[in-house]
Image: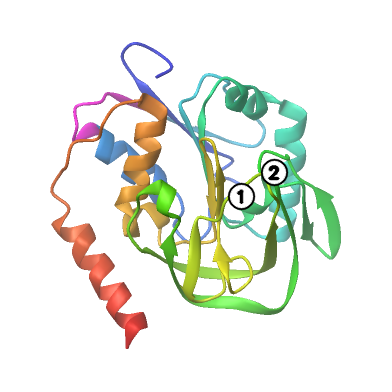
Amino acid sequence: MSTESHLRLIWLYPDLLSTYGDRGNLLILARRADLRGLPVECAEVRADNPVPADGDIYLLGGGEDGPQALAAQRLAADGSLHRAVERGATVFAVCAGYQLLGHSFFAKGAKYPGLSLLDIDSDRGESRAVGELAGETHPALGLPTLTGFENHGGRTHLGPGVKPLAKVTTGIGNDGQSEGAWNGRILGTYSHGPALARNPAIADLLLRWATGMTMEPIDDRWPTALRNERLSAVAR
């Protein structure tokens, strides 16, 4: 943790990357930390402000092409996210935020450089991926089935430096076969929902990465009901 008393959660560029309720990921993390007695400090950093380099968990959401390209340019110029990753910070990114963590992505019909924090490249697919997304998560993560909602035109190709978050059973994800990517303490996904509301085990994984602490069980009856309903819907 960045200080003795607080877990710092940094929501990056909510003015550019905050579609489909992705801010909910910040709220879920803060709530699950609070239920375990972990004091939390949340910061929402707009694109015209410097990025704090002392955060514990950094969050990036989805966005349209223009804001995505601008966010990548400003994060690269700022440099603080790279410095945070170098010292071991955790990063969770969704959709456009996930793509811009890679080496390159397409926006507004052109190829843009990403942040190269994940060994991925993204381009355009032949059709838009819209609808429920589900998959069996990578066994090394120890997570249950992934559930979410996707809405993107991209296709993401994984390099040897990352592992997929999940093997797709419903939807498209990266390419119809795999979904998301992770390496070290960086994890990206196409799953909205918000992703951490549907997948509280991922929230707990991020908290564990950031704190080094075991996350004791909490009452998950409502998240479990949501997950069961959504997974049952795609199984019909």
Q: Quadrant of residue 111?
A: bottom right
What residue type is disc 2 on? Ala
Single out the residue that lies furthest toward the bottom.
236
Q: Residues within 10 Å of mark 2 (few under 14, many from 20)?
A: many
Query: Residues in magenta?
Result: 34-41
Measured as percent of width and height from the top left, residue 226 is found at: 25, 66
Question: What residue is disc 2 on?
Answer: 71
Q: Main secondary structure of the magenta part?
A: loop
Measured as percent of width and height from the top left, residue 179 is found at: 54, 63
Residue at 24% over, 35% down = 215
Q: Which mark is residue 97?
A: 1
Q: Which mark is residue 234?
A: none
Q: How many marks?
A: 2
Q: Is residue 37 left or right of residue 211?
A: left
Asked if residue 78 can be seen in this view, the reply is yes
Cα separation between marks 2 and 1: 9 Å
